Amino acid sequence: MDVQDYEYYEARAKNVKLEDITSTQHNADILARLRDNDPDITYISIADMLEDFFDFVVREGDDLGWLGYFVGRSKQVKSLYIEYFPDNLNIAAFLRGLRHNRSIESLCISTDIGEDFKSLRPFLRNNNSLGDLTFSHFDIGLQCARNIALLLGQQSSLKCLCFEETNLGDEMFVEIASVLRKQPQIEELNFYANNIGRNGCVALGNALKGTGNPNLATLYFGYNDIDDEGIHALVAGLINCDKLTSLNLNGNALITGAGLRSLSTLFQSEHCRLEQLNLDQTSIDNDGAAVLTAGLARLPSLKKLHLSDSSIGDQSLQALVGGLGSCNLLEDLYLSSNNMLTQSVVGMRSLGTLVQRTNIHSLFLCDDAVNDEGLQYLVDGMANCCRLKKLVLSYNNSITAVGLSFLSSLFRSERCSLCTLLLNGVNLDDDGAMALANGLIGNMSLKTLEFSQSGITERGWTAFSKLLCDTSSVNNTYFSNHTIEKIGGYGVHAMPSGIVEYLTFNKLQNCAAVMCKILDSHPDIDIEPLFQWKCKCFPLVVRWLEKAKPYLGYTYMCEAEEAFQCRELSMVYKFVCGMPQLTVDGYRGKQMKDDQPKTKKRKFDLTYHE
């Protein structure tokens, strides 16, 4: 769009009939809001079907030049998603209008616009607000990669560059990597699932090595074809990235011990500040675990470690635990789908000890063939653990009620801080439910107990019901569990309504949950045990009832205010009947005090007279 073209749209913008330049009323409404600078229209998606309120669905009859003009002059649009452009419409007209925009911060392109990529160059050159550029879910050919490389050469404000599932391969990726050395300001690179192999790693390693003072903090390189030599070349560049905090290499099954040795070199480098490492679905054997451990032992900054589905056996686990002992900041440890994990109990006990001695908050052990014995030794190692917040044991089908009973020592520890326990896929029956319910007696930390497709019958649900609200006495109700907010999960359909109600109460503040349960379970409260303190407890009972009144609506009884007043009067009546003489004496004493003449006390003159 030249100056004359822009003036053409500018002169007609106020009076143009939007219905004449769009294919639907919905699209016309979007143009109207863009024209009026509606502050709520902060993103636009150009799509082939309507899924969201701000989807501009392109059809024959839509003038893309007008769309480009209104987006170009908008000061409110922060995000633009280009998901679809039909071949028979004028894409270039839209892109020429887009060049005038200065507000867009995020641009995502999910369709191949061919040679029209070149028309984006003025937009990228002039828009200093753009920080996030994404290409996703279409095949980028060689010429397209070269056009995108030219685009990147025009931009200097990018913070995040993403190519997700674009089938780059080595040849196309080399074109992209060649311009990255001129982009030291980029903080995040994402090349997820792009078939990048050894040559691509060499190109990226060279680019990072040749970049002066790179700001790269996050690198996603998962699900590619990276092998040991590729890792070696990549590490040569990553050593230059002293701001790198997150490295994701998951899904690269060709990485073995030799590649891990190169990574270990990176971890031991003087300026390494890595906080998150993802090596899920790599091949970590005993030798690989040994060399990885040597690096992790020199990485005190590590906070999150992913090693799921990485063929870790008992010997490998013991080696890793030894190295992680010095990672005092480690919070999340993922070890799921390592089916060799429990060949012996030594590894599980050492893992439990690691959890106790470090700062681990979340431990993931899904589908690890953990059995009752393994769980016992894990819990033994975690004795008196005070930092673990989340424990995931889902899909360990060998765990029975016997194993679940061992968790009671963790639940009942005074230092227990566990908030979430996930047991999805575990064959939970009545015995397992009773083991969990009995173990949780007195626990005040667990909020979520999740399991699915259970075989629990009335006997098991009764145990959970008694845990949440023991109705045998007011005292026992008071000392029930008022912390758990969720029991069960997907596939659990037979939970009694009473348990659902108790869990709803537990989402209130602790004292409110107690009040609701007492009101719900004890319509006629026995106050005789309070008589031993005579009338001293009477004001406390009245005050408790006043505090409880606002929570009447939370009970399934939905007790009316008149009925609640009857409760109050009933308690007063019980006090009067239970201690009539004290009540009368108290009343008479007050009357006598009120009837006494109010005389002014005489002040004695204590001055000494000779």
Image (tube, helix red, strand yellow):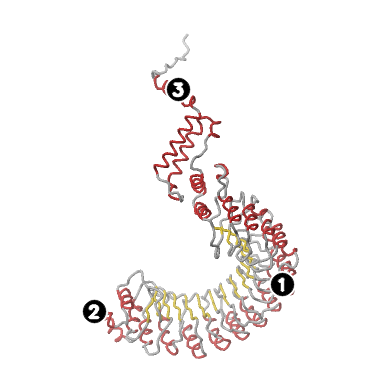
Q: Amino acid at mark 3?
A: Gly
Q: Is residue 243 above or below residue 95?
A: above
Residue hosting label 1 = 289
Q: Residue at x 38, y 84 (%)?
A: 95
Distance, label 2 to label 1, CA atoms, is: 70 Å
SS label for mark 3: helix
Most extreme residue toward the top is: 610
Q: Which mark is residue 214?
A: none
Give the mark nearer the N terminus: 2 vs 1.
2
Residue 589 numbered tag = 3
Vertical arrangement, residue 248 with respect to residue 452, above or below: below
- Give the image location of residue 437, x and y in percent: 62, 53
Give the Cα separation between the discs numbered 1 and 3. Answer: 83 Å
Picture mark count: 3
Q: Is residue 599 left or right of residue 577?
A: left
Circle 2 SS class: loop
Image side of residue 387 versus residue 49, left or right: right
Residue 327 vs 576, above or below: the answer is below
Residue 405 or residue 40, whichever sits in front: 405
Helix, strand or loop at mark 1: helix
Q: Position of residue 367 (x, y in %)?
A: 65, 69
Residue 90, percent across and down? Answer: 36, 88
- Of tags 3 and 2, the one toward the viewer is 3
Q: Which residue is mark 2?
A: 15
Residue 300 point in image, percent of width and height: 65, 65
Displayed quadrant of residue 453: bottom right
Front: mark 1 or 3: 3
